[in-house]
Image (tube, rainbow, N blue to C red):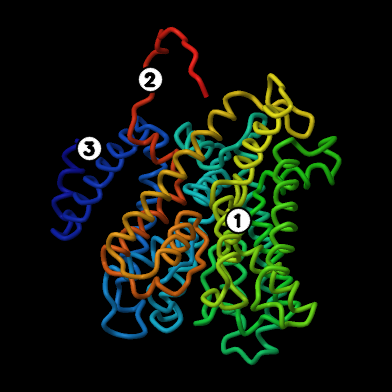
Amino acid sequence: METQKAFWLRKRKPAWFRFIEHVVSICRVRARWLRSRLARLDTIRLLVLGYLSYVLIGWGMLCLPVSHQIDGLHWLDHFFIAASAVSTTGLTTISTSESYSWFGEFVVLMLIQFGGLGYMTISSFTVLAVAGELSPLRNRVSQATLTLPRGFEVRQFLRIIFWFTLAIETVGAVALYPSFVAHGVIQPVWQAIFHSISAFCTAGFGLFSNSLEDYRDDIWMNFVITVLSYSGAIGFIVLHDVWLTARQRKPHITLTSKVILWSTFWISAIGTALFAFGEPTVSTMSPVQRWMASLFQVMSASTTVGFNSIPIGPLSGSSLYLLTVVMVIGASPSGTGGGLKTTTFSALWAEMVSVLRRRDVTVFLGKAIPGLRMRTAVANIMFYSLTLAAGIYLLALVEPSPLPDQMFECASALGTVGLSRGITGSLSMTGKWIIIGLMFVGRVGPVILGMAFFDPPKETPSSSEEDVAI
């Protein structure tokens, strides 16, 4: 009787309502099928597909007419901007402020935020806040995205990321607001919010055609941008350790944090000194301006934020080489920056010193580094170097610009930095695709992308060991 009643009620529904019910039912079935397929997908491949989905969604939204401020924009430029925002690079083929409406700028900012914090980080925190726990799939992907060392619990770390990000970006926006007001900038609130998020996510996207060159002498602006950039670049592992240590919930910070802080300090200090004494364009400035501009530019390359307070084009060859080396080393793991990572550089440095001192194990700051981490560091630098070399060669094949400019552009793209010698806007379509590829590889990680092409071994190979001369 009940079944017959339900049948007659269904017959009374309008045709359009029954059609919507049918579509919803199909979508639910497809969603369950997709979730089951993703659950069986390798974590590394899911991570790569996740970042690619961000780029495609952002590209689609930037192609909408409501996102445009001018007509005649090419679809490839929108794709370039989307890839640059998700990878938090900052290289642009068109002006963000002149080409896009407020909605378009908002889309770019959201891509920066999602790309900077990592695939699934924000959505996983939302699920964690509502459900109180993560699914095995989200837990696996979050672990791969954040590259956490042993001893870190994913759920607690996600909470730390969300609240630290919200607090730092809010304080940064409030701190930047007076400078924009003092300079008479239009929409100072939006400018402060945009540049605060862009700096913390080390994206380097700005709403000015010459980056921050007009604010070279603004000490407060330089200080706030520097603090925001370093906060994002040193990574959430350091913020997590310092926070718990300050609250006396941990006796001391971890070795990872010590390595990051040690390497970041010395790279910045040595780089700033070399730039200040070796760059002719800053030699005519006052001592305060000279050291402030030098620190800001080295910081911009080291954190991979990509802002510039002085023109990059006129820099000398030695300074360009210095910035290229700093860009390649890059920021730190579990942060918003790119590059080879300070921990990889430090591990290789420790390996070199240990060999010179004839030690049987690799020691850094009095602690032995596990062999697995050393293997990862060697693979990382090898894959990174090969990718950079391939990108430079391919760009040199299709672009007529000088080779030093192309090398700098490729290093900036792969390191997700965003500094440029001014050739980005004149790239051919093929050249744009090469830079897009480098930016995407830089965000995902060369080793991660390489691992996505291979299946994990089903069993350990039983090959015999034989010595090789090195």
Q: Earlier in the sequence, mark 3 or mark 2?
A: 3
Q: Which residue of the protein is positioned furthest toward the bottom in this rendering?
A: 184
Residue, disc 1 = 326
10 Å crowding of disc 1: few (<14), some (14-19), many (20+)? many
**Secondary element at image label 1:** helix
Left or right, 202 with reference to 407: right
Most extreme residue toward the front is 469
Observer-side mark, 1 or 2, equals 1
Whether residues under marks 3 and 1 lie with C-beta atoms below 8 angstroms apart, the answer is no
Q: Nearer the viewer, mark 3 or mark 2?
A: 2
Expressed as whole percent of the image width and height from the top left, the position of residue 320 reads 56, 65
Q: Position of residue 388 (x, y in %)?
A: 43, 50
Give the residue at x 45% y 64%.
404
Q: Give me the C-alpha separation between circle 3 and circle 2.
A: 56 Å
Q: Which residue is mark 2?
A: 457
Indicate the quadrant where residue 400 lies.
Answer: bottom left
Q: Which mark is residue 2?
A: 3
**SS class, disc 3:** helix
Residue 179 location (% of width, % of height): 70, 83
Amino acid of disc 2: Pro
Identify the image quadrant of the N terminus. Answer: top left
The amino acid type found where label 1 is placed reads: Val
Q: Residue at x 68, y 22 (%)?
A: 361
Residue at position x 58%, y 79% in the image: 191
